[in-house]
Image (spheres, rainbow, N blue to C red):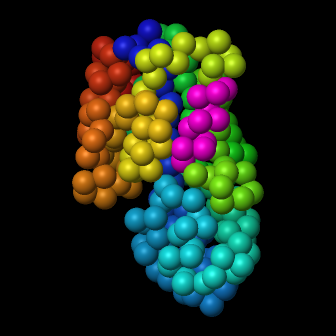
Amino acid sequence: MSGYSAVIFDLDGTILDSSPIICRAMSLASAEFGHPRDPEVFRPYIGPPPWHTFAEVTGEPMEVVERIVPRYREIYDELMADTPSYPGMPGLVDALAAAGTPLAVATSKLRSAAITLLEGVGLADRFVTIQGAGQDPASAVKATVIGTAVADLRAAGVDTSRMVMVGDRHHDLDGAAEFGVPTIMVAWGYGLAGEEEGALAHVHTPAELATALGLSHPVGVA
């Protein structure tokens, strides 16, 4: 076991380097609704639910945003197969699973997309549960997704008394805090300076994350 009874992972910016494909899909969707934007404009918004992103970037009312989001997801579905994982993260997930640590994913990404992506990089079966957003904005709130993942872990008989969240944005930290779960923030994701404030630790490599989680020199982690 690691030093924790269970580990909940964020996905985008933590396990997967999703930024280029997400930004491209958001840019294409936004342009179709009359708001051409460079893909890099969307990078600071990776992590929060897409309704928030499109409302802020386009200035459109929610009734229009609710049409943009499904189109974005259609475009993203066509592109997402090329999403890479961060070097060292598959090895870390494997090491935690091999050590007997129950694992979960909690992401604001559409749940079906999260499952498909993790299957694509060969990691889906390492997790007790993979939770993500449904079709409405409320389902994508990070605390809501984390709460569902925690409930799934408990239903599976997992000891949730010493859980930890691993993420890259303040949404991860804030959402986990609602359940009394501390967060380890990773520096290789999409968080802005200062978002790590209040985190249990701020790590810069998967090897540092392994140490923070109580693993010693796992294979394939640097």
From the viewer's side, name the closer residue of 118 and 67: 67
- Above-or-below relation of 24 to 155: below
Q: Is residue 91 visible?
A: no
Residue at 73% of width from left, 67% of height from top?
70
Dominant secondary structure (helix, strand or loop) of the stretch shown in magenta = helix
Q: Can residue 8 be seen?
A: yes
Q: Relative to 209, is 133 above or below?
A: below
Q: Could you tell me residue 178's position as x and y percent? A: 47, 38
**Horizontal side, residue 86 vs residue 119: left or right:** left
Q: Quadrant of residue 63?
A: bottom right
Furthest toward the bottom, the residue is 34
**Relative side of 10 to 214, left or right:** right
- Residue 92 image offset from top left, x and y in percent: 43, 26
Inspect the magenta stretch and tell me whether residue 90 lies in it. no
Q: Residue at x 38, y 55 (%)?
A: 190
208 vs 55: above or below? above
- Residue 146 falls within the magenta-colored stretch: yes
Q: Which residue is nearer to you in this view: 160 or 68?
A: 160
Q: Quadrant of the N terminus?
A: top left
Query: Looking at the figure, which quarter contains the C terminus?
Result: top left
Q: Nearer the viewer, residue 1 or 49?
A: 49
Numbered-mark total: 0
Residue under the image location 63 percent in, 90 percent down: 34
Which contiguous range is marked in magenta?
Answer: 142-152
Q: Give the x, y percent position of residue 171.
A: 44, 50
Residue 127 location in percent, x, y?
61, 26
State the residue at coordinates (25%, 54%). 194
